[in-house]
Amino acid sequence: MKSAADYRLSQLDELESESIHIFREVVAELERPVLMFSGGKDSIVMLRLAEKAFHPARLPFPLLQVDTGLDFPEVLATRDAWVDRLGVNLVVASVDQAIADGILVDDGRTSRNRMQIATLLEALESGGFTAAFGGGRRDEEKARAKERVYSHRDEFGQWDPKNQRPELWSLYNGRLHEGEHLRIFPLSNWTELDIWHYIARERIEIPSIYFSHRRRVFERDGMLLSEHPANPCREGEVVTERTVRFRTVGDLSLTGCVESTAATLDEIVEEVAVARVTERGATRGDDRFSEAAMEDRKKEGYF
Amino acid sequence: MDLLRFATAGSVDDGKSTLIGRLLLDSKAIFEDQLEAVEATSKTKGYDYTDLALLTDGLRSEREQGITIDVAYRYFATPRRKFIIADTPGHVQYTRNMVTGASTADLGLVLVDARQGLTEQSRRHAVILSLLRVPHLVLAVNKMDLVGYDQEVFERIRAEFVTFTQRLNVPDLAVIPISALQGDNVVTRSENMTWYDGSSLMHHLENVHIASDRDLRDVRFPVQYVVRPKSDEYHDYRGYAGRVASGVMKPGDEVMVLPSGLTSRIAGIDLFEDEIAEAFPPMSVVVRLEDDLDVSRGDMICRVKNAPEPTQDLDAMICWMTREPLRPRQKLAIKHTTRSARAVVKDIQYRLDINSLHRDTEARELGLNEIGRVTLRTTQQLLVDPYEQNRTTGSFILIDEATGNTVGAGMIN
Ligand SMILES: Nc1nc2c(ncn2[C@@H]2O[C@H](COP(=O)(O)OP(=O)(O)OP(=O)(O)O)[C@@H](O)[C@H]2O)c(=O)[nH]1
Ligand SMILES: [Mg+2]
């Protein structure tokens, strides 16, 4: 006879089960879902969970990528490999295209990351998408820690953090009015370490820049940024070659790397387990402008 | 390593967020950049000490007002367990957010300020935790540093709380004297309270026995989604996807599908590419049946001689969460497991007085944050169990059809 203790899931299995439940609930209840896919580790894990949720059927929704024009080529390569393998439809919304079409104005001061917001909202609206899966995790940032799994957005794509719908048990409320949409966060309860444990366990293909490699970098605001034509050095900044890896991937001009010799998944898990600085604090310029940088961007419609 | 979900509860300023900050800090779940940020903020605001609550109070308005408005979910792990914490607001205005955080908790952590003792809000939260059937409860008597670590103060609050909870349904209660700010009895036993011989809060959280909280006997599998690949390779595949609410399911088991009442056997259970030998809560799986039955979302798979009750009449405790009161004849949308329907309020049987636990049978409505026993009639049959037996098939939410907001939480009697 088995005992009750034999019927407990490991924490990774429990997180997996919760995420799969969320995917199925959304597809059953909402008309036009889409998965926001950046090609980073979180969106890849999210895609893997979606694959599991509907197997052996194909994914019942397309992927949407916001192309900042400054994406790492390694990330785009991994994205294409995933899209090929799953045979899914990929919609690319390009910031450059939005500027060319006059939807956005590049004033030379606004970061690409910020211009992503308008591009994203435009793509969601023109695609008629009512639910957009995002790879945000609550452990990433203090404003994200407050967000529901089903996060309601008004017709301007805005989040109202002081007025969120109660979310009880696993009974999600997918009611919408015309023009509104939901952001869905299936990875809400995962931590950075859970993500890495899962990638290692499932042998999931991720972009090579997460592993240690030699790269020409320069220091800015305490971050190590890649040498790149779109990212010219300012006075006093010196390019050197170092052994680094990325903890998050985003816009090339804002995403820093860290010095690291972790070249395998096991070494990364080990490194993350003892890390003393958050992934965003270490490497994301966009979160550093003010204490509520993330909250402000989220209110406007950021991922 | 397993997972324990817990939620904080208690009045405004009893120290919930500070305690969570302390637990995160002492379990090394706080990163240097996060700590530096709150140290800097505390300094700018002219505080004498680092305000650990700033570690979880992440919204701008929360930091401005120094209170928690909405639940913050935080995470930490020790070698024994991973913890998901819901740090909930104490302010009565935000009770619905407290209910949100507590609904999925394995353990409720009620804080009381040692100087104040039990307040209306600590009682309200204890009542909510017991209604939600959160299986384990901890009362942490906080700010012991401000009462000179006095044992008598602690004993008095403990006795009062124990008396109060005797009238509630609280299967497991631990009472711990702490100082969230100073760290006494949070991770390690305090030198300042040698009269206390129980375990520290962290030790309790790591060791509380949760394996038998789940029902492994009564099979309940609400069908979420039908998987039909429509590809050549899986031409005839038809699987029922869902999350096991309770019970253990195995291939070969004889099962019944509700509401049709048709029976079949489980042909196989799939978890992605693997066929598995058994499925148990809270696994998300795909179940295949031997016979070609008409099964769709909202149906329930269970055992032949052990089924939930199909009913259109609900008798439930309702926690009301919006300003516009709940009244007889009101019509609402209802979501129960994977089934959605409409409901009309037939009767308010009574409103519960949080302090005295008195049942006011004269009440004609339920206001914001009030709790009462209500009868509803639904447009469709729902497949229900009493909430005390099953937190999944015994719970539902009520949705305002005009605004789309979630306005009520229901627990079936
Ligand atoms: N001296 C002392 N002060 C404490 C202790 N715990 C909390 N405080 C202080 O009490 C005040 C309120 O603490 P919070 O943690 O914000 O209270 P809360 O329970 O989270 O409040 P809400 O979330 O708004 O309901 C802060 O100034 C804390 O520093 C303690 O153990 N000792
Ligand atoms: Mg608080």
Image (cartoon, coloured by chain):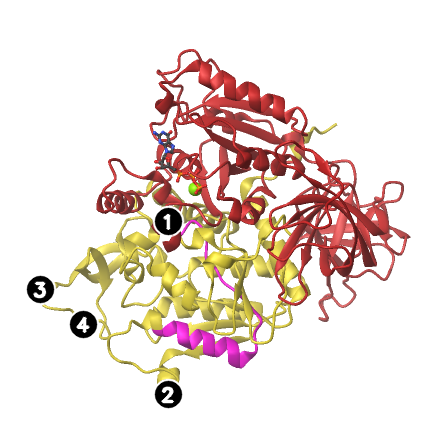
Same chain under badges 4 and 3? The reply is yes
Identify residue for label 4: A232
Identify residue for label 2: A102
* Distance CA(mark 2)–CA(mark 3): 36 Å
Same chain under badges 1 and 3? The reply is no
Vertical relation: A71 (above or below) B384: below
Q: Which chain is yellow?
A: A
Q: Nearer the viewer, mark 1 or mark 2?
A: 1
Do labels 2 and 3 touch, CB within 8 Å? no
SS for callout 2:
loop
Residue B223 image label:
none
* Distance CA(mark 4)–CA(mark 2): 26 Å
Identify residue for label 3: A236
The chain holding disc 4 is A
Residue B65 image label:
1
Any part of residue B103 in sight: yes
Amino acid under disc 1: Gln
Tell me which numbered mark, 2 or 3, is placed earlier along the sequence: 2
Q: Nearer the viewer, mark 4 or mark 2?
A: 2
Amino acid under disc 4: Pro
Do labels 1 and 3 touch, CB within 8 Å? no
Do labels 4 and 3 touch, CB within 8 Å? no
- Judging depth in this view, the residue of A187 and A29 nearest the camera is A29
Amino acid under disc 2: Gly
Q: Position of residue A172 (x, y in %)?
A: 63, 56
